[in-house]
Amino acid sequence: MQDAKIDGMGTIYGGEYKDVSIGGMGKLKGNIEAEKVIINGMFKSNGEIIANEFVCDGLGRILKNVKVKKAKISGVLKIRRAKLEADNITCDGVITCTHEVSADEIYIDGVCSISKMYGDKITIRNKNDGLTNSKIPTKFLMLTNIYLGRKLSLSHSLVDVIECTDLEASGLKAKIVKAQNVRLSNDCIIENLECAGQTIIDDTCKIGNIPNKQIEGADNMANASIIKILELYKSGKINVEEAEEMISIASNRSFKTENGAEVPSVGWADDGKIRIVAFRGTKLLKKSEAGTYNLSVEYKGEALNVECYGNLKCGDVLNNVDAGASVECYDIHGNVNSGHSVNCKDIGGNVDAGHSVTCGDIEGSVKCGSSINCKHISGSIDAGGKVNIS
């Protein structure tokens, strides 16, 4: 078998090769089988790749499936509407995939944004400065969402769905994780976690839902607030009566709505949802009651879910937002339900607003009582006023 090599500009056509090397700017037309594929320059693949070894040290754009024994990514690899299948995958560069990445062993020590990841043993270690120190030029960082097809994060590795036997992750943000054994640390954010075996999670992580599972260290996490109260008492900052009252609130106490229904203060499920409400004394005001509409809250940072009885202003929300009045946020990855106007960047789900909607891209449908001003809407539109898509 012959080698295929591009040092300047050129095209490789389908066939069988020993080694395929891209040092300049190259394209692939047709399916290939090779011993080794090495990308050191810029490469666009419009054909399926089958190889023993796949190495990306440059910039690769993959539009068809890749099936290899070993894959190593130290540069930037974009996989769009295609799969990467391997026995072993290591990445200390940048990898994005809008479809699926699967391997017996996956080790990521760089930056990733992947729709679905399947494997036996998966290790994800996010570097806080991983994207900044990657081979992506600084001016290009603002365009990564457009060019790579998925959003990249400076602080987290992004994976929508992970299914594996063993998962060890730090700095991971995921919607669904299903694994036999899980170890999470360093500010992991997981919406739904299903684990049949050992589950170890440190107190920096945020977990939305863990059905029927006892977490190692959970007792310490649950007792953290009471320990802080006792420390305040020991230091003389609160007296014994104040300490007893605070411990009672942290342990057992419930608030009541105007109609007498109990609403737990700390008894709400530990589902990662931020609940922003208004109380009159110990009585919870309903969304429709006076005083809730004018309640304005600014929350700095990312959140899984947010429920606010008044106006809401916050950063990224990883799931849904439900507000009694206006919503002003950055990216919202789920649905938005607002009693008044919505002003955000991109929204990953549906929007239902009582007044106007002003956003970037909306992946779902929009229903509002007034005007719409957006860049793109994937679903249906039902507006009471003018619609401007630009």
Image: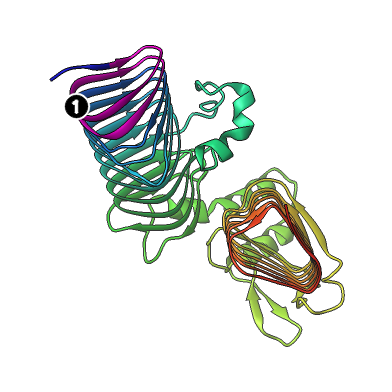
Span of residues in magenta? 5-33
The secondary structure type at the circle numbered 1 is strand
- Magenta segment, prevailing SS (helix, strand or loop): strand
Scheme by which the image is coloured: rainbow
As for residue 215 lying within the magenta part, the answer is no
Residue 288 % position (x, y): 79, 79
Q: Specify whether residue 160 is in view.
A: yes
* Residue that sits furthest to the bottom in the current view: 259
Q: Is residue 30 above or below residue 306?
A: above
Q: Is residue 187 above or below residue 60?
A: below
Quarter of the view holding residue 19: top left
Question: How many labels sit on residues?
Answer: 1
* Residue that sits furthest to the top in the current view: 7
Please give the residue where the numbered disc 1 appears in the rendered image.
34
Q: Is residue 168 above or below residue 288?
A: above
Residue 33 % position (x, y): 19, 31
Q: Specify whether residue 153 is in view.
A: no
As for residue 30 lying within the magenta part, the answer is yes
For image coordinates 57% across by 21% down, the residue present is 137
Quarter of the view holding residue 27: top left
Residue 62 % position (x, y): 38, 36
- Rendered-image quadrant of the N terminus: top left
For image coordinates 29% across by 33% down, the residue present is 89
Residue 78 % position (x, y): 43, 35
Residue 40 is left or right of residue 113, and the answer is left
Viewer-proximal residue among 201 and 266: 201
Viewer-proximal residue among 163 and 215: 163
Q: Amino acid at mark 1?
A: Ala
* Residue that sits furthest to the left in the current view: 1
Residue 237 is left or right of residue 207, and the answer is right
Task: Classify 10 Å Cα crowding around label 1: few (below 14), some (14-19), many (20 and above).
Answer: many
